[in-house]
Image (cartoon, rainbow, N blue to C red):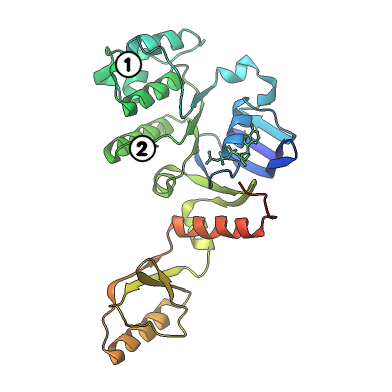
Amino acid sequence: MSAVEIRGLRKSYGSFEAVRGIDLTVETGEVFALLGPNGAGKTTTVEILEGHRQRSAGDVSVLGHDPGRHERALKERMGIVLQQTGVDEYLTVREVVQMVAGYYPAPRDVDEVIGLAGLGEQRDQRVNKLSGGQKRRVDLAVALAGDPELLFLDEPTTGFDPSARRQAWETVRGLASLGKTIFLTTHFMDEAQALADRLAIMADGRIVATGTANELIGASTPSTHVHFRLVDGVEPPAGLGVHAAASAYELETTEPTRTLHELTAWALSAGVELHDLEVGRRSLEDVYLQLTADAESDAPAGAAS
Ligand code: ATP
């Protein structure tokens, strides 16, 4: 059975439809990332899965339950890490986790949870003495206390320094290796690419693409990206589809051999250097920007926020 099944989900706020009939499946044991620009409908979707919002239409199954029924049997099997949560800051890390574990029928060992969240050294510190990033890890430990099968992570590394981000990624990988299903939302393409087995891009209340990062990048054509810089005053060649991009030039091509041959032949004959020449696949970010821009331009005026 899939961990999450969504069919024809819709959610309206008054006359505004924030989620417009989406279908999604998250398999058990998968790390799944939901991406999308501000206002795309991600939080609305996730909060419906968590049971925090009622849907307007469609079918939703989370671990075989309808989250709209608020069944305890479901709540015991999932953990939620919101962007901001409140725990009693005067308790120590261990006391907080111990207390939360007491609410669950089959909690995970408290010290193991603290270790999984990367808080071993802070175990006996009061929460109010921790850094912002460490407090986020307390939120993660709280979500793990009941040993959930399914974990929702809402922008888990926003505000983290680069090494804390890498540590958080290791934690997510560790949880995945324990067989947990992880549903995360993020604005970071590198994070989605590093962690997610599959991802979905949402824009304007709709899913505009789903698949592995490689599938999304591969499905988008043209697929080879060329980037270079010219000294001031030199214009790029015509006819190759070159466009200006932030003090450089870029082009996309489905014929990289021919295109590079023509570009370098032009540069040699004109006696100009192609500075910082880079040839590569389009990145997930390129694909994301294109898909979300396409969705935006297709949307009826005023629909996007
Ligand atoms: P972000 O990346 O900024 O968190 P999001 O993709 O999570 O965005 P949502 O929070 O789901 O987006 O919002 C989707 C749309 O629904 C937005 O246009 C938002 O203004 C609107 N919306 C969300 N919650 C409500 C509400 N309670 N009442 C009215 N409109 C709402």
Q: Which mark is residue 128?
A: 1
Q: Residue lying at the far left in this picture: please name it.
A: 121
Q: Is residue 271 above or below residue 104?
A: below
Q: In this view, does 189 lie above or below 267?
A: above
Query: Which residue was labeled with disc 2?
Result: 169
Give whichever of 98, 91 is nearer the camera. Answer: 91
Give whichever of 57, 18 is nearer the camera. Answer: 18
> Which residue occupies 46% across, 60% down?
286
Indicate the position of residue 195 as horizontal and vertical percent values: 42, 42
> Which residue occupies 36% across, 9% down?
95
Mark 2 residue type: Trp
Indicate the position of residue 35 as horizontal and vertical percent values: 52, 45
Indicate the position of residue 270 as horizontal and vertical percent values: 30, 90
Circle 2 residues within 10 Å: few <14, some 14–19, many ≥20: some
Q: In this view, does 37 lie above or below 117?
A: below
Indicate the position of residue 57 as horizontal and vertical percent values: 75, 36
Q: Is mark 1 within 8 Å of ligand 1?
A: no
